[in-house]
Amino acid sequence: MKLANQVFSRQILKEYYFLYGNQIAKHIKEIPKREFAYASVDRPGLKRHLSLENSERLCDMLKTVSPLHFYHSGAYYLFPDKEMDAKNWIEADLIFDIDVDHFENKDLPNQDFIEYCKLCYNCFPPSTDICIKCNNKLKSKLWLNQKDLFEAKNEAMRLTNILNQSFGVHETNMTLYFSGSRGFHVILDKNEIKNLDQSSRMDIVDYMRLTGYNLSYSEPKDLKNILKQFIQDDYKIFDKKERKILEAIKKKMLNKDESESLTLIQKFSPKNRSIFEKYIKKKKMIEIDAPVTSDIHRLIRAPYSVHGKSGLSKIPVQDVDLFNPFSDPVLLSRRKITLKISYMPKTIFIDNEYGPYFNEVKELPECFAMFLIGRGVAYIV
């Protein structure tokens, strides 16, 4: 990070944590039993195995270090400041992470990309192959946009519905957070859930992701709902060979009623059966990040802390339908500052449209400047 960006980031984060330190402390349960970790603006790497006695100590630390990223353990320990094998694990929250970057089976056709030079750190519009400044081959980098986060929001809603309907978890016993960047976290922290061991958590992951799914175990009523979607689908997320098989199956089903279609499924050849099972898995699995849920020692971004790669805060979401990820989590200063932007696509931020900008100097709100610096496309002038 350029020195001017470091100075700016430290200042704006110091101001932020002075204002929101108490809010962060309020949202972390049993502080003395948690491990804490942070990354700073000017030093690479994560400082881990920190223990804090109470909320006052936590607030003091935030004001002192002004972290670029701030985490706490999902686990509760007897000795949180020790190395991992000496911490004495007690229990852990059950954590689910929905992140667009980890989506495997969603058709996301409207994603925005920029081209990025790893040598000189300049950015360029899509379809640019070579850096015009150092002649290095460029690398594509995903841009954070409303469309991707809309998909993440839908997936988070599907997750909370399954937790409620299949596991009997009432909505008051789970907390949904915007992660601060490309997705959402769902936290369950009731006593009967916190005692789950790693194996039990892995079973939950397998259930959500339909690991080892077998068509034989599907209820007819579930298959009927899948068939409606199957007939209307275009199978874009499958390769050419698989798409051809699925379209042939669809053709056979078009003039059949539900009962006939269910009978046809039972008579599938092993090959068709395997492809149809793959279709169901891709469409019905919940795209959670498996290691986050199964790992009983996982660190998670602290509520109301700033995500250093976006300048957005991780905040609880009360109404998913009304939530705006480019407005509601914007808690940094909106004073104006001048910066130079290498390249950014058109972006809507706090209900204002910016860009596209290519090698331009602009005066923008500090919160948006932090977003652009975090994405690696701008620097303070």
Image (spheres, rainbow, N blue to C red):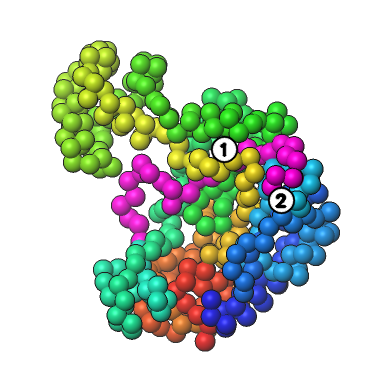
Query: Residue at point 40% right, 83% down?
Result: 360
Question: Outermost residue toward the bottom?
Answer: 381
Dot 2 or dot 1, earlier in sequence: 2
Task: Tell me the SS state at disc 1.
Answer: helix
Q: Residues within 10 Å of mark 1 (few under 14, many from 20)?
A: many
250 or 119: which is nearer to us? 119
Give coordinates of residue 259: x percent, y percent: 27, 13
Segment colored magenta = 84-112
Q: Is residue 191 left or right of residue 272?
A: right
Q: Is residue 15 left or right of residue 100?
A: right
Give coordinates of residue 316: x percent, y percent: 63, 49
**Three-letter residue code for mark 2:** Glu
Q: Which mark is residue 83?
A: 2
Task: Tell me the SS state at disc 2.
Answer: loop
Select label 2 or label 1 by which is in front: 2
**Three-letter residue code for mark 1:** Ser
Q: Residues within 10 Å of mark 2 (few under 14, many from 20)?
A: few
Give coordinates of residue 16: x percent, y percent: 69, 68
192 or 261: which is nearer to us? 192
Q: Is residue 199 left or right of residue 36?
A: left
Q: Label 2 to label 1, Cα distance in Å?
A: 20 Å
Give coordinates of residue 184: x percent, y percent: 54, 48
Rendered view: 330 above or below 370: above
Query: Residue at point 75% right, 68% down?
Result: 63
Q: Is residue 270 magenta?
A: no
Q: Please indicate, yes or no, whether residue 52 appears anywhere in the rendered image.
A: yes
Q: Which mark is residue 351?
A: none
Q: What is the quadrant of residue 130 in the picture?
A: bottom left
- Mark 1 — residue? 294
Q: Is residue 111 magenta?
A: yes
